[in-house]
Image (cartoon, coloured by chain):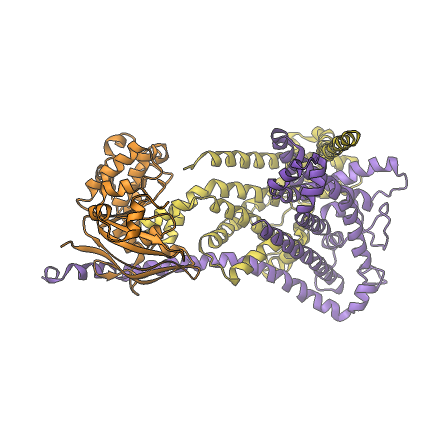
Amino acid sequence: MERRRRRELLGRIFEGIALAAILFGLLVLFLLLLDVARRGLGVLSWSFFTSYPSRFPEQAGIRSALLGTLWVMALTALFSVPLGVAAAIYLEEYAPRNRVTRLIELNINNLAGVPSIIYGLLGLELFVRGMRLERSILAGALTLSLLILPILITASREALRAVPMGLREAAFALGATRWQVIRHQVLPVAFPGILTGMILALSRAIGETAPLITIGALTFVAFDPKSPFDKFTVLPIQIFNWVSRPQAGFHARAAGAILVLLAVLLAMNSLAIYLRNRLQRRHQW
Amino acid sequence: MGLTTRSVAEIYAARLQRGMAARWREWGELAIQALLFFAAMVSVFTTLGIVAVLVVEAIPFFQQVSLVEFLTDPQWTPLFAQKHFGILPLVAGTFLTSAVALALAIPVGLLSAIYLSEYAPARVRAILKPALEVLAGIPTVVYGYFALLFVTPLLKRIIPDLETFNALSAGLTMGVMIIPLISSLSEDALYAVPSSLREAAYALGATRLEVALRVVLPAALSGIVASFILAASRAIGETMIVAIAAGQRPILTLDPRKAIETMTAYIVQVSLGDTPHGTLEFRTIFAVGLVLFLFTLVLNLLAMRIIERYREVYR
Amino acid sequence: MEEIVLETKDLTVHYDGRPAIEGVNLKIPRRRITAIIGPSGCGKSTLLRCFNRMNDLIPSARVSGQVFFEGVDLYGPDVDVVEVRRRIGMVFQKPNPFPKSIYENVAFGPRIQGIRDRRKLDEIVERCLRAAALWDEVKDKLHQNALTLSGGQQQRLCIARALATEPEVLLMDEPASALDPIATMKIEDLMRELARQYTIVIVTHNMQQAARVSDYTAFMLAGEDRVGRLIEFGPTQQIFTRPRDRRTEDYITGRFG
């Protein structure tokens, strides 16, 4: 009896520790957000969004970084989404079970684990120097496209796999070719899922810093990027730059920029969750 | 005239034969398939591209710096007048921050996973799990900010001789970042353990703790180990936290209070500087990148192997 | 003497190198309903899917022997699969309308054949929905999502959709197994009606249904080796009242599962 009670007490203690562990992670998250808000809320003003970076902390803003991020994200989506969806379609709808397919899948799994800075080295040699794109928005977007491709492919494959087999069979039985089946029946049903995956992949890209530093994105940009061939900076690099300065004024600017970045991420993720929930309610038969 | 005299079978035969239209359609289908295949092959080209870039730039480096010096010299000073090319200090820095990170993330992540899978009521789980996942979605540059401007000042109160840039803060912050990686992969492994196994143990009078630790955990062990390996790979490759908070001083030490430099932080340092492309100094980042790539490749392949094996067990 | 539309000769299907059905010789008469019955796992559906080459979609499936449609070997070298599937329509076990409007479901077949003319499409949709005895129920909501229909209506929509490519043959794979008795009855009435114009092959595990609707019945059975074979084929009445094979008799009197 005594032993049984001791065993149960031990169980309670362990449960407490395990709960504490998960709460620890959440506590740190809370402290992080609190610290960023405490330091950064004060700098959020209209001029913070419309000013270029500056030597004087109180005048420095995120205008060029925000524009750079928009440019890079738009181009990254443009390159990576068609490529990722096409690769996913091939692997889910066409690929025979053979060694080439196995090789491709192994590659995608492995690429998902390659450090992002390695992609930066690839981008530097392939796009910046090899294709002579220099330190342009285009080079940055191409680099990030390769980086998020594995995430996009995996998410798109899941969305395609969720489309019921019966739908494909119905279309094939009506004399549709494989591409007609995919184009008219499978893709429309998988679309919300693919869109969700796309948003999550882009939200990974938007926070990336290291590969863009490696390809030579600038840390000080006092002009608006106007074409894909312009030099650029992005929000995370601007944050990195300000964090690395000794003055507290720049740290506050960094916190302000982090707030903007997190707000964008929050918006993107909320949209993804909203789309996912809508997807789950439809197409049940 | 001809139509009326042909038999029904002949007419159908003609209609079922592949005509010009069918041939065009088949060509179109084939072209589409080829295009899609090419898109899928981009991943293979990317891997080849990475290997090619690293090797092509590393070869001239190793023509000037011997492999023995690279692997054994205890000093890394390529940007100074007195040049030494021993990668050991960078490797040591990388391992130090990664070890600190794993020392935090493994126990916390695993306990979180056990709580979510074995203890949490469904409604609590539905809140805690996504909340924990948020940690994985925060950009690493934000963690770098947090490590330098929050964690380090906090730790300085406890450890007065902590340097402003140090492996400890960077490592701990990185540990927090990879908690969700360990917890979600481990939870998948715990979840995959058949409930019949748990029920059998309960039927023998085991408490929840005993079921969790003696039955479920051992059964899920390979998946859990795989999550640790992936976490290690992630920590080794992590860049911004260490570039911001761990310092740029490549010294061979295991003291986490000191400023060090990791392989990734070194690549950032050179990228930000004005070292001209094509010089020996610049090529060092490809040699370092190659070592980094090999480390993570081995860990990733190992983890993938383990995961594949335990998936087969429960199929 | 009946006119023959479909005929199999020594038809054998392998999955992953293992035979699923073997040596099937069967003749399907024109404008009649032929039921394929047998216990589950006897290869009824596998046989049915040979008639419109749906087995092509399963990479591990190998078909040998011949299937003649109007005298043409469907597995011959120069046959256009797409055309085969248009001429030989299929209705599945679970109603599987596309998650689109009722109109778009029926119009899909003609559309992918290149028919764009709206008036022509309208005409096809109405004709097929009428033929499937669904027109009166849906004519006011043609642009509503098909998934809002009841299960029985969905299945009749799937029949209308199959009719839109103007097939000669309709293959039905247990078309009523997911439906309630009233919806089942409507489908069966519809089948009788459609048999005036179309050849119908129906797979069913429901013997009463086979007896009620079909003109001819084929009985299949998998032996100890789990390979499905055709045991007996004949007019439905004969199969159900005077089967020649002992195993057929055992099955229809309910002695096997």
User: Which is more toward the observer, B33 or A74?
Assistant: B33
Q: Colour of chain B?
A: purple
Give the chain coloured yellow.
A
- Residue C68 image-quadrant placement: bottom left
Rendering coords of residue C84 (x, y %): 28, 55
Give the chain coloured orange.
C
Q: Is residue A35 left or right of residue C87?
A: right
User: Which is more toward the observer, A50 or B279?
Assistant: B279
Q: Is residue C57 above or below residue A77?
A: below
Residue reaching furthest right? B161
User: Which is more toward the observer, C124 or B187?
Assistant: B187
Rendering coords of residue B124 (x, y %): 64, 29
Q: Is residue B91 visible?
A: yes
| Residue depicted at x 61% and y 29% | B123
User: Which is more toward the observer, A56 or A49?
Assistant: A49
- Residue A201 image-quadrant placement: top right
| Residue depicted at x 16% and y 58% | B8
Rendering coords of residue C186 (x, y %): 26, 35
Rendering coords of residue B172 (x, y %): 78, 42
